[in-house]
Image (cartoon, rainbow, N blue to C red):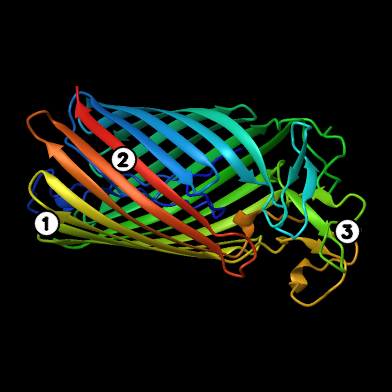
C-alpha cells in the first residue's frame, strides 16, 4: 500500500511557507518576521522554525488512526547544518509502519461476500459490512537537500529522495530557484521535480478489469511523474504576506491500485452475479493535474493568521477545493497555541463506480449502470476517487526552551470524511504528532 499523505487523490503540490513564530523572536519588519522559504514541490504545510546553528536536529513522531481501520505511525529524524553563509544541507530519514484493515473497493450489501485476497487466501465479509483486506507494510525514506545562495538575490534548493516498501520503490529529485526583486519585497520562484516508481504487487500484477480470481501474471510495473511550479511571494506591508503559485503534474505508467476490486451486481436484488462477480480495477495510464494555491499571512501584534485556498483539477474529471485556516496565539515569548480548521470537497473521477450493474433500477446511480463489462475502458470503486467531503479541526501547542535552545510542538487533529452521495461509510481519524527540535 502506498500511503499518500493527506490521504486524498488530488496530489496537492504547493510551496512551503516557513513562518518564524513570535514565540521564538521579535523582528522589526514583516520581511524578517514572516520569512518565506524556497518553494517545494512536495508539501504546503507551514512549519515553525528555530534559529540556525551548527546543527539543527528535529525528531518527530506522528500517529494517524482511523476508527476501526488503518493505523499509521511515522517517525522522522531531520538534521540541518549551515555550511556557509545562508547555505544549508539537510538530511531527513522517515520510517513508516502501516497496518490494519483497508477497504478493498467492494460495496456494502445485504449478503455476505466471498473474494480472493492478493495473497491468494479466500476471505468472506459479513452482510451489511464493507469488505476489507488486512495488510501490514513498512516504509523507509531518505531525503537530502542543499540550499545555496547563488547571488545576493538568487537562491537555489536541490534535493534527491528515495523510499521503499515491500511492494514499492520510489526515487526522485527536485530543483527550485527563488529570485528577490522590488527591494526584496517580492520573491519569484520556479521549480521542477521528477519521480520514478517501481511497483511489485503482492501476488503479482492483476489484469485490469479481469476476474478477481484470475492469474496475476503481468509482472512488475513502472510509473513516472514530472512536476513544475511557478510562484510569487509578496510583502504587502510590515505585517502582511501574500503567496500565490501554480503547479502542473504529469503522470504516466501504472496508475492503477492492484489491490482494489469492483463488484458486478445482479440487477434484480443487488447481490453479486453468479459468475465472476468481482473484477480488478483499472485506471488510465496517464494523468495531467493542475493546482492553484493562494495563502495570506497576517500578523496581529504577535498573533498570526494563515488563510489558504487550493483549487485542483485533472483530466480524470476530479475537482477539489481546499480551505484552511490557522490562527496562532502568542501566549508568551516562549509559548504559542495554534487552532486549525480545514474543509475539503472533491468530485468523483469519471470512471468511478460504487459498483457495476447491467440495468437501471430505483436507487441506483446511472453512472453505475453498465450494459456490458466489455464496454468498459476503466473502472474503480476506490473511495478516494469518489465524491468526498472532509473536515479537519485541530490544535497545536508550541514551547520554546530558550536556555536549552530547543522547541517542542504537540499537535492533535480530528478528521471526518464522508461520501457526499452517502454511498460508503463515513471515515473518522485522529492525527497526533510530537516534534522536538534542538541545537547540537
Left or right of 431 on screen, residue 381: right
Q: Position of residue 69 (x, y in %)?
A: 55, 45
Mark 3 residue element = helix
Residue positioned 50% across, 31% down in the render: 97
Q: Where is residue 234 in the image (x, y as percent from the top left)?
A: 27, 60
Left or right of 303 on screen, residue 131: right
Q: Do the CB atoms of the residues marked 3 and 2 lie less than 8 Å apart? A: no
**In the picture, which quadrant includes the C terminus?**
top left
Nearer the N terminus, badge 2 or badge 1? 2
* Gap between marks 2 and 1 measured at Cα: 29 Å
State the count of labels.
3
Left or right of 379 on screen, residue 100: left
Q: Residue 385 carries which label?
A: none
* Gap between marks 3 and 2 measured at Cα: 54 Å
Q: Position of residue 291 (x, y in %)?
A: 49, 59
In which quadrant of the rendered view does residue 245 lie?
bottom left
Residue 166 visible in the shown view? yes
Find disc 2 in the rendering and name its residue.
155
Label 2 vs label 1, nearer the camera: 1
Find disc 3 in the rendering and name its residue.
373
Find disc 1 in the rendering and name its residue.
302
Mark 1 residue element = loop
In which quadrant of the rendered view does residue 121 lie?
top right
Q: Where is residue 307 in the image (x, y as percent from the top left)?
A: 31, 63
Label 3 vs label 2, nearer the camera: 3
Q: Is residue 182 or residue 124 the one in the foreground?
A: 124
Amino acid at each position: 500500500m502506498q500511503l499518500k499523505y493527506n490521504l486524498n487523490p488530488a496530489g496537492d503540490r504547493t510551496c512551503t511557507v516557513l513562518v518564524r513564530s513570535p514565540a521564538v523572536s521579535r523582528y522589526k519588519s514583516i520581511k524578517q518576521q514572516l520569512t518565506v522559504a524556497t518553494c517545494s514541490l512536495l508539501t504546503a504545510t507551514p512549519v515553525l522554525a528555530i534559529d540556525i546553528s551548527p546543527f539543527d536536529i528535529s525528531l518527530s513522531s506522528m500517529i494517524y488512526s482511523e476508527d476501526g481501520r488503518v493505523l499509521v505511525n511515522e517517525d522522522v529524524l531531520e538534521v540541518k547544518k549551515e555550511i556557509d553563509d545562508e547555505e544549508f544541507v539537510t538530511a531527513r530519514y522517515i520510517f513508516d509502519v502501516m497496518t490494519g484493515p483497508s477497504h478493498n473497493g467492494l460495496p456494502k450489501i445485504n449478503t455476505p461476500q466471498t473474494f480472493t485476497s492478493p495473497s491468494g487466501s479466500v476471505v468472506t465479509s459479513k452482510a451489511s459490512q464493507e469488505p476489507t483486506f488486512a495488510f501490514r507494510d513498512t516504509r523507509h525514506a531518505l531525503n537530502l537537500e542543499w540550499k545555496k545562495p547563488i547571488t545576493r538575490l538568487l537562491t537555489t534548493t536541490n534535493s534527491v529522495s528515495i523510499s521503499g516498501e515491500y511492494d514499492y520503490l520510489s526515487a526522485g529529485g527536485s530543483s527550485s530557484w527563488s529570485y528577490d526583486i522590488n527591494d526584496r519585497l517580492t520573491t519569484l520562484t520556479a521549480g521542477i521535480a521528477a519521480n520514478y516508481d517501481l511497483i511489485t504487487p503482492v501476488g503479482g500484477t492483476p489484469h485490469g478489469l479481469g476476474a478477481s480470481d484470475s492469474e496475476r501474471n503481468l509482472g512488475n510495473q513502472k510509473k513516472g511523474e514530472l512536476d513544475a511550479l511557478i510562484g510569487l511571494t509578496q510583502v504587502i506591508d510590515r505585517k502582511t504576506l501574500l503567496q500565490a503559485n501554480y503547479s502542473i503534474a504529469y503522470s504516466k505508467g501504472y496508475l492503477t491500485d492492484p489491490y482494489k476490486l469492483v463488484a458486478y451486481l445482479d440487477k434484480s436484488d443487488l447481490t453479486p452475479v453468479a459468475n465472476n462477480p468481482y473484477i480488478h480495477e483499472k485506471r488510465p495510464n496517464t494523468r495531467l493535474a493542475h493546482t492553484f494555491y493562494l495563502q495570506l499571512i497576517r500578523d496581529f501584534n504577535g498573533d498570526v493568521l494563515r488563510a489558504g485556498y487550493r483549487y485542483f483539477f485533472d483530466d480524470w474529471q476530479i475537482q477539489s477545493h481546499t480551505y484552511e485556516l490557522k490562527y496562532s496565539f502568542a501566549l508568551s515569548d516562549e509559548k504559542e497555541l495554534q487552532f486549525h480548521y480545514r474543509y475539503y470537497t472533491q468530485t468523483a473521477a469519471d470512471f468511478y463506480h460504487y459498483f457495476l450493474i447491467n440495468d437501471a433500477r430505483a436507487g441506483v446511480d446511472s453512472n453505475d449502470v453498465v450494459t456490458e463489462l466489455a464496454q468498459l475502458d476503466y473502472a474503480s470503486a476506490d473511495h478516494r476517487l469518489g465524491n468526498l467531503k472532509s473536515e479537519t479541526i485541530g490544535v497545536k501547542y508550541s514551547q520554546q526552551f530558550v536556555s536549552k535552545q530547543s522547541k517542542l510542538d504537540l499537535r492533535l487533529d480530528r478528521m471526518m470524511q464522508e461520501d457526499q452521495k452517502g454511498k460508503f461509510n463515513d471515515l473518522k481519524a485522529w492525527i497526533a504528532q510530537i516534534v522536538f527540535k534542538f541545537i547540537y
